[in-house]
Each structure stands twice: as C-alpha cells, then as structure tokens.
Image (cartoon, rainbow, N blue to C red):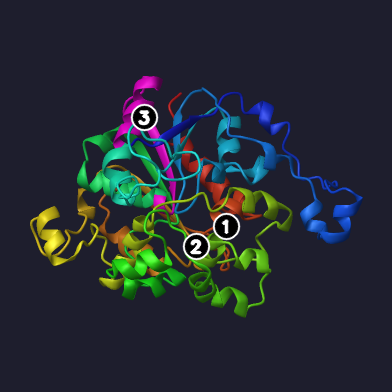
Amino acid sequence: MLLLLTVMLFINAIVAKISFEPYNKCNKIEKLFRNNEDCIYNPDEYLDVREKRGGQPVFLQHGLLGSSADWLMNGNNSLGFLLANNGYDVWLGNARGNTYSKGHISLPIDSRKYWNFSWHEMGTYDLPAVLYYVSNITEKPGEIIYIGHSMGTTMFFVISSTNPQAAKNVKLMVALAPVAYMTHIRSPIRYLAPFSSDFQWLARYLGINQFLPNNKIMEFLAYDCELFQIDKKICENIIFVLFGFDEKEFNQKMLPLVLKNEPAGTSTKTVVHYAQEIRNGGNFQAFDYGSDGNMIQYGTKIPPKYQINNIKRPVYMMYGENDWLASYEDVHQLSTNITNLVGLYKVELKSFNHIDFLLGKDAEQLVYQPLMKLLLNFTSN
C-alpha cells in the first residue's frame, strides 16, 4: 500500500478563495441554537487539496493523525502556499490510513491485515516509493527538499537509517518538531505506555484496527485539557489532547476547519509504536512484538534500534520548548547523534507547541520565514 501523493496545481486559484473574513453561514433558526463561532463561514472548509508544478521540488510530510491538509489550513500563511508562491514545486504526502490514503488493491478496510502497520512501514516501504516517484516525475534525482512535521520526521529517520540509498533522493531534510527519542515526552501518549504490550486491552480501548479511542480513554487522556478549562470542543479532539493547546497562538476562527480535517486517522499500531518507545526508556526502536514475536520478526528477543548514525543526508531541526511530543531534551539528544546536522533552531516563543508549527498565528514569522531563508541555500536555480 503506497503513500497517496497529492501534487498542487495552480495554487493561486485557491489562494484567491482563502479568506477568514467572518460572515454568517447560519440561517435565522440555526443562530438561536449555535454559537457565533460555529456560524462564521470559512471557505477553506469546502476546499480540497489541488495540484501544482514548478521548480525546486519540496515534499511535505504531515505528522501523527494528520493529512496533507495540515500544510494548507493556516490560509495564506500556510507553509504549502508560501512555498508555492515562491516558485517551489510542492508535493504533499498522505500517510497510509488517513482520510486521503485508505485505498488498497486487495485488502478490505475492515481487515486486520490492512491496519497492520506503523510508521516503520511508512518509512521502509511508502517513503522510498514516493521519493522515487517525485524524483522520476520531476527528473531531479537527489534534489528533493523534504520537510516533515512530527511523525513525518520519524518516517524520514526510519528510511535514512535503514535504507540510506533510498534517502539519497533527498537534498535536505527539515525536521519540524522532530520525533525519535521519547524519554522526556509530556504528551498523554505516555499514559498508554504500560499497556502497549497488552493487545487485548489495546483492542478494547483504542480499537483493534484504526485508532479510535473510546469515551472512557478520551476522558482519561483529556484530563489535563479539562483541568485548564479549555473549550470542550478542543478537549474532545484527540489532536489537541495528545499534542497540547496554545490558546494565544490558535486562531479560534479556524476551529471549524480544524475539526473538519483533524484527526485524519491512523492505525492503532502507529500510536502504540510510540507508546512502546516510552515504555522502553525512550529508545528509537522497531515495533516490539514480544520475545517470541521478535524472534520471528527480527531474530532477536529485543527489537533492534534504528541506527541514527546511518543518516547521511543533511538535516536541519526546528523545535519548540513547550512541545509535548517532541521535547527539547529529546531533540537535543537526537541532534548530537546526527552526523550531518546543518542547524538546530529553537523557536523564540516559550509557549510554542507541537501543533503551532502548522496552525500557530505566528508560525510564519517564527518558523516559516527563517526556514525560507535556509532553503535558498539548497535551492537550484
């Protein structure tokens, strides 16, 4: 099952439509029963991802529970639009199992085999295929600028540590909120770590195939969210529950758009793989099938660790100090083990969190503008 690619064509037509000017989408009766925020019309709610062709190829890979829409939801200030408007040939990836990437040539979507994957398979099978595809279509092998967020960085670390030859199609890797080691994680995902080898418990409370936590688990995971008296709609969304919420950086007018697109879906195994790392001392390692299963899968009782020192492509990291999933301590540990690190950038806002890299009001100023300057050093004429 290959990663679904979406290429953006003539984005300017979409940009012209994007506006966050509030006007009402509710009729007179609906106004009586709905909040004002629910009635504000946002045309992005009705847009789909379009395609474009251009110059320097840039591949954007979203994170955990996200989709290609993540790179476009912040309107004209979204990274996807900024890159396209600056002449880049922007490609958007969709991880298997999300809204845009559920097709399969033989397996039905309700089968266990269909959902038997984590970010390991995304990194070892899907990513090599799409990087080759982009290189082939653009006829620019070795010229792809790869920008990943969250799990999108994990996928790249997997491919570049296990298959350096396939990673040669990448000219530069930019890691936004990089996730590999998970020793200091603050996300409620850590609460799942003790149960990450209890497959009966996981099936009962998280879903055996697609990641669908039941109400009891959501209430448990959302405790911190509710403790700080955050909007109920936000506390009911697993994205904010797992990654945190930054009220000052979030544009409330975007909430209907975000709720429409997030979460985009993934497998339970994908989330459990992260939880296993937490249980195993934060190690960046392959999926743990138990002693017997590991012997069958790997020939060892303990899952192998990914060899970070195998990563040879240039890597540039950007991180925030208030990131629940990619803690700055773990990011620093990762940075010291990457031999071809070209830069480590700390976002100059202490409250900046995991989701702010995509939806933050100040993401353009704090992240994208410095990033665009960096990319000029790796952009072919």
Foreground mark, 1 or 2, reads 1
- Amino acid, disc 3: Glu
Q: Identify whether 320 is placed above or below 188.
A: above
User: Which residue is the site of mark 1?
Assistant: 356
Q: Residue at x 13, y 66 (%)?
A: 291
Q: Residue pushed farthest right?
A: 28
Say whether residue 143 is magenta: yes
Q: Position of residue 210 (x, y in %)?
A: 42, 53
Disc nearer the start of the sequence (1/2):
2
Q: What kind of element bears circle 1?
A: helix
Q: Position of residue 226 (x, y in %)?
A: 61, 76
Q: Residue pushed farthest left?
A: 299
Q: Which of the pair 347/298 is nearer the observer?
A: 298
- Checking the image for residue 143, the label placed there is 3
User: Which residue is the site of mark 2?
Assistant: 320
Examine the image and state in which quarter residue 283 appears. bottom left
Q: Mark 1, residues whose alpha carbon is within 10 Å: few (<14), some, or many (≥20)?
A: many
Please state if 263 lies on the left or on the right of 255 as rendered: left
Q: Tell me, yes or no, whether the two marked residues, 1 and 2, touch with CB atoms within 8 Å.
A: yes
Q: Which residues are the magenta region?
A: 128-151
